[in-house]
Amino acid sequence: MKKWQAVLSVSVTCAMLMNGCSNEAETSNGSKSADGQVSIKLMHRYQTSNIGKSPEDTAVLDGVERFKKDHPEVEIVEEQLQNEDYSIKAQALAAADDMPDVFIVPGSWMTNFVANGIVLPLNEELDKRPEWRDGYRPGTLDAGTRDGSVYGIPIAAGPTHLIYYNADLFADIGYDHFPKDWDEVMDAGSKLAAKGINLFSYGDKGKGYALSSWISALTDRYNGPAWTESILAGNGAAFTDAGFIQAITTMSNLSKSGYLNKDMNSVDGDTMVSYYFEGRSAAFVSGIWSAMNVVNNAPDNVKNATKVAVFPAAPGGKGNPLASSGGAGVYYSINAKIKPGPKLDAIMTLLEYMTGSQSAKLMAEVGGFPAFDPGQFDSAKLHPIALAAYEASAAADATKIFDLWFDASIVEVINTEIQSVMSGARTPEQMAEAVQQAYKTFLSKR
Amino acid sequence: MGKALRPSSWLMLLYLLPGLSIYSFVVLVPIFSAFRYSFYSWTGGPKRSFIGLDNYVEIMRDHVFWQSFLNNGLMTVYGLIGQVGLAFLFALFLLSRAVRFKALHRTISFFPSTLAPIIIAFLWTLIYNYNYGLLNEGLKLLGLERLAQSWLDLSGPIVLLVSIPLSWQNIGFYTLLMLAGLSAINKEVLEVAELDGATGFRKAWYVIIPLAKPTLMVASLLCIANNMRGFEHIYAMTGGGPGNASSVMALYAYDTSFLRFRYGYGSALAIAIMALTLLIILLSAFALQRKRSTDGGGS
């Protein structure tokens, strides 16, 4: 008798507690505030404290401010989070089906969010605004599009692969340009090693750098874009194909020859760049986002000597030697629960303010590479490095960024295996086998 | 407690209610919901599909999970030696008459236990750093420059290398535990042993260890439980790398849920971790207890 009473009262208390939580969640989901004014809940990872430091933060938040000024009737409830915090919070909210009205979705999450019906298809709304829709650079909407439906508005684009190199250090070993082929790369590597300098600094502690900045571009040099398309479509190409193995072997050779920093798997991107600033390395491979880092933080002698290049052509490779892995990686998406009406209109206008023409111009002027083509902009204030990165980006044929396009299960295996290969614990062939295995599993489930 | 003083069951229940309800809300409910989710294929949105035992079948074949399990096992072994074993020695030293400034030693050895695991991991990442690290600098000073390594990039001994900071952090805690246990030993027994000529090592082996067995057992079980659920140090120091060389079960479950969006499988992993840890603790408790009872019968 007493026992079941105890159980009962405990469970009643629990139920009450949980009920309290879910009630709270429901009320916070209301779309319009009491007086009929439209209120938009915006959650993103751009921060006021980064204005002036990061081109994306500067341009997007400027868009929010302009919108507030032009549309005082719309209330914006904004939540700014740091990258890591954003990922954790967004995933928790998505799992609880409690996303805000407008939020950021990295391209690699998009398949999952579309499958779970979290994000709203935007084709109809975009078709109402053709001028804005057609202003995006080719391919930048792709990673946010599934089966022809656009689920995300891109913000920035630009390559994930560029080489920032110290021209003075290369001049010292007799190169007045960045090595033009891989034999020259290895030759420069050995000459630099003789002086105690690493050819590249490399920092893959976060697991993802290698795939994003190296493997995507390097595999394309060997295999060409057709291979990537075939992998994505699942019609024949394999990770055990020679080109993929050669790309990994190229990286592994750099590591084995000692042309990279020894602690390549245990330092992060910041340390990698600081090794370059300290003159420990003659170059580093990174995305366009590093351009402003060099401009703002490099010591003057390094900053003045820094130039921008991309990987040389692969021997016998099928890819375009000017190409770089690129395209938009991060999107604004809208909660699938929002119905057409004044609120959706207001949200679309807000997104245009944050990512459209005016925002794009500003982003380009402060050294970013917007997804929306800004056309002519005032490049006078740009540092030569930022301008060079911008021009290399605009000239580069954008090939697919693997981590945005491949399924997360395959990405994880590549990210893990490449660390093992670079540390010498596994061979490129073993890695290719493991990735192919994950790919086969993925295809069988599709 | 005397019957007259005992409050009514209802009152007892009322007293327990706040604690019990918080406990069930933050511990029991999540465990039960993880158990439920483990039978679903769930990618983190409103849609879930029931797949029965498929997740558990996959765990059986998942070699990364079992490698992580082995790493946990290895860490536990290192922990038993480096945390419980060394702590026992420290406690013996601290009790012996030869050591001075005992309070100072106690405080300093306990100090790392008060730091957050992330801070410990950061400190040791710096110590292991190839270019600026204390370890490599020390080797240089000793003229052993050729031994300098980028320590956290070594796949071979990586589990040992990430276990050392754990020992460094926890040794003070176990030392305190041992000190409490050892000082409970009747002084007269020790004096008699000394009179009988048992000193130093023999005193420790034949007198102190058998008498301190309950404390040693508790410490060992705590250590096993701690190492089986190890996460923070590894997450911050290596992220499980290079490759999967230093992956542990909890980290793998975290990655599976939050990087690969496989919440169902991640839940199944969490349940498997709980089951395996319980199993190991039960087995070792059983083994330790049996040993104690046979020891007791022999004397």
Image: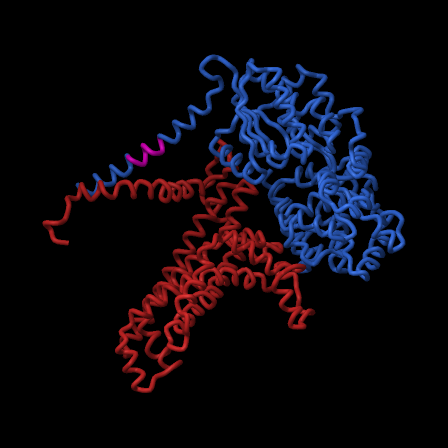
Chain colours: A blue, B red
Q: Position of residue A138 (x, y in %)?
A: 75, 28
Give A356 or A300, whichever is nearer the viewer.
A300
Q: Residue at x 69, y 31 (%)?
A: A156
Q: For the magenta stretch, what is the residue range?
A: A13-19
**Depth order, front residue of B130/B77:** B130
Residue B68 relative to residue A378: left or right: left
| Quadrant in which residue A232 is drawn | top right
Image quadrant containing the C terminus of chain A: top right
User: Eyeballing the image, is B56 above or below A387?
Assistant: below
What is the quadrant of residue B234 in the picture? bottom right
Q: Position of residue B31 (x, y in %)?
A: 39, 44
Nearest the eye: A206 or A71: A71
Residue that appears at 61% across and 20% down? A350
Image quadrant occupied by the N terminus of chain A: top left
Q: Main secondary structure of the magenta part?
A: helix
Q: Is residue A179 visible?
A: yes
The correct choice, above or below, for B88 with respect to A432 in the image is below
- Asked whether B210 or B55 is in front, the reply is B210
Where residue B211 appears, x then y in whole percent? 31, 73
Q: Is residue B152 left or right of residue A361?
A: left
Residue A17 drawn in magenta: yes
Residue B180 shown left or right of residue A180 in the figure: left
Q: Relative to A417, is A103 above or below?
A: above
Q: Quadrant of residue B203?
A: bottom left
Q: How many marks?
A: 0
Residue found at x 50% / y 39%: B41
Find out whether residue B278 is within the magenta segment: no
Q: Position of residue A236 (x, y in %)?
A: 72, 42
Q: Is residue A432 above or below residue A39?
A: below
Quick check: can you spot residue A397? Answer: no
